[in-house]
Image (cartoon, coloured by chain):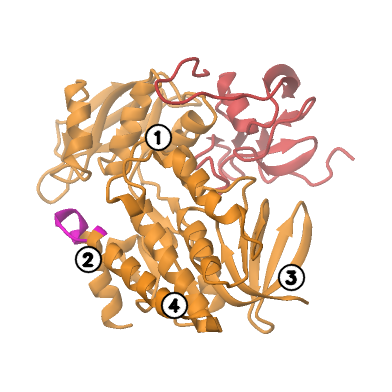
Chain colours: A orange, B red
């Protein structure tokens, strides 16, 4: 079996950045992606990003994958395997099991960078499995990638950035948004997104939750209610809403199965999305040679995923003997940019989560 | 329903193809997810759960959650949120766990 130098699992913002960084310094990279195109969830992000130029700020998410691909396509030391799923890791041989078009084959790599992303969380309420109840990201995929609207009138649960951005995108696609509700007493996402929706007359109800969905076979109505200071429903505040779609935007959890299988030490840190891998500043996990980047490491923005990818890619290349003064300069720069992305009031949750995670690492 | 006009996006679509849903002929675009074609035709119930027989649709749309399993050309447990539509496919609501090679 041929041994690859660096295998990167996932070609979203983190994995692409990791592959680019490692390849820039001469490492041979194999990039494995389950979809038939690269870009991960960037391909449905129609909003412009914040941050600085190096983090592709002011570009829409959908425009970033082609820019990243430009940096890979002319490199002979990068191989991209599309429509290829990593099915498992075999610790006895240190081999990844891959599947492409129902053919199964092994792949061995000296370093593995896991950039598998995250999956949408759901929420417990009566009839939460009715058709017409979708993750906010699912609605984004349906609308922005495939051009199909999810319904006529939507109730959005959750006012984090995804909930706010998807609400705006629903309006852009001609769908009504009945309301955005938020269990916390304040709006979770950036004020600039929330203000845009308020100017368009969309009510954002804080301290509210959903009690139930109703409908014979699909969503026809929803019942919401107010919450008191201890997040308990307030009797008499129930309201029925005529909606045919309910969108759940209550966060993401890391898609970390492969890390568990590899035996990476995991820690439960709610501020980072759930069980996340313990790692050092170079993004190396407790298993030597296994690195992480992006939402699988901690649920954050695409901009920080790209920086983590860059750090992991550079560190993995360095450990294989591709180190240089220039590599150190680049890594220091990426670490500083990641730090600045997490600074300020909006990065407080991530900083506290990181503090919690790194303390015992 | 399909989006006809959008302030930012355009939707390059494949050629129109015919397929069946529970025997009924529908149209969609080649290469789009089966779930998108069904949704555009107003179909949101994709299967019934194994134990309580409750109707289910898709949830994540990117192949993670397995809420959208249907029987396609006799093969059960196809994730129709990512499986691509092809001309002449026979797509059926899946009841329960599905039976492998039921039609062979």
Q: Which residues are magenta?
A: A341-348
Residue under numbered circle 2: A351
Q: Earlier in the sequence, mark 3 or mark 1?
A: 1
Alpha carbons under labels 3 and 4: distance apart: 23 Å
Give a yes or no on whether discs 3 and 2 share a subunit: yes
- Label 3: state its secondary structure: strand
Alpha carbons under labels 3 and 2: distance apart: 38 Å
Q: For the residue carrying disc 3, how many other residues have a C-alpha within 10 Å: few (<14), some (14-19), or many (20+)?
A: some
- Is A201 above or below relative to A163? above
Alpha carbons under labels 4 and 1: distance apart: 32 Å
Toward the viewer: A351 or A179?
A: A351
Give a yes or no on whether discs 1 and 2 share a subunit: yes
Query: Residue A284's mark?
Result: 4
Residue A226 can be seen, yes or no: no
Which quadrant is home to the C terminus of chain A? bottom left
Residue under numbered circle 1: A46
Of the two numbered discs 3 and 4 in the rendering, the one whose residue sits closer to the viewer: 4
Q: Earlier in the sequence, mark 4 or mark 2?
A: 4
Q: Residue at x 57, y 56 (%)?
A: A72
| Main secondary structure type of the part rendered in magenta | helix
Q: The residue marked by circle 3 belongs to what chain?
A: A
The magenta stretch spans residue A344:
yes
Q: Position of residue A220 (x, y in %)?
A: 40, 22
For this view, does A295 lie left or right of residue A208?
right
Q: Residue at x 34, y 54 (%)?
A: A54
Q: Residue at x 37, y 79 (%)?
A: A280
């Amino acid at each position: 079996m041929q041994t690859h130098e660096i295998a990167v699992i996932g070609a979203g913002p983190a994995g692409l950045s990791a592959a680019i960084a490692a390849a820039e310094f001469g490492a041979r990279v194999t990039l494995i992606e389950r979809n038939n195109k690269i870009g991960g969830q960037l391909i449905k992000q129609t909003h412009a990003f914040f941050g600085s130029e190096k983090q592709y700020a002011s570009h829409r998410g959908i425009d970033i994958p082609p820019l990243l691909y430009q940096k890979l396509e002319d490199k002979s030391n990068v191989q991209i395997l599309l429509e290829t799923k990593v099915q498992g890791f075999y610790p006895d041989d240190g081999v990844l099991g891959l599947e492409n078009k129902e053919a199964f084959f092994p792949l061995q790599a000296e370093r593995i960078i896991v950039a598998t992303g995250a999956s949408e969380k759901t929420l417990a309420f009566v009839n939460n499995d009715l058709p017409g109840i979708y993750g906010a990201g699912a609605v984004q995929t349906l609308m922005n990638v495939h051009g199909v609207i999810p319904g006529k009138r939507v109730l959005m649960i959750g006012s984090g950035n995804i909930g706010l951005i998807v609400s705006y995108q629903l309006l852009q696609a001609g769908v009504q948004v009945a309301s955005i509700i938020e269990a916390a007493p304040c709006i979770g996402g950036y004020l600039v997104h929330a203000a845009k929706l308020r100017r368009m007359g969309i009510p954002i109800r804080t301290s509210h939750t959903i009690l139930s969905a109703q409908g014979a076979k699909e969503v026809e109505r929803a019942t919401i209610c107010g919450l008191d200071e201890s997040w308990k429903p307030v009797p008499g505040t129930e309201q029925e809403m005529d909606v045919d779609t309910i969108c759940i935007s209550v966060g993401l959890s890391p898609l970390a199965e492969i890390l568990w299988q590899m035996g990476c030490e995991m820690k439960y840190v709610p501020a980072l999305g759930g069980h996340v891998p313990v790692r050092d500043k170079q993004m190396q996990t407790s298993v030597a040679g296994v690195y992480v980047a992006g939402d699988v490491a901690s649920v954050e923005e695409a901009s920080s995923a790209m920086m983590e990818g860059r750090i992991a890619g550079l560190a993995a290349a360095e450990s294989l003997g591709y180190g240089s003064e220039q590599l150190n300069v680049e890594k220091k720069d990426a670490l500083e940019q990641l730090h600045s992305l997490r600074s300020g009031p909006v990065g407080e949750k991530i900083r506290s989560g990181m503090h919690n995670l790194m303390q015992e690492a | 329903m399909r989006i006809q006009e959008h302030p930012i996006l355009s939707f390059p679509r494949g050629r129109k193809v015919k397929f069946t849903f529970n025997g009924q002929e529908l149209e969609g675009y080649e290469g789009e997810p089966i779930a998108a074609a069904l949704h555009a035709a107003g179909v949101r119930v994709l299967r019934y759960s194994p134990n309580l027989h409750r109707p289910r649709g898709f949830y994540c749309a990117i192949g993670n959650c397995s809420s959208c399993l249907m029987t396609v050309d006799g093969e059960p447990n196809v994730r129709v949120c990512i499986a691509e539509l092809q001309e002449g496919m026979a797509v059926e609501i899946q009841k329960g766990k599905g039976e492998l090679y039921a039609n062979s």
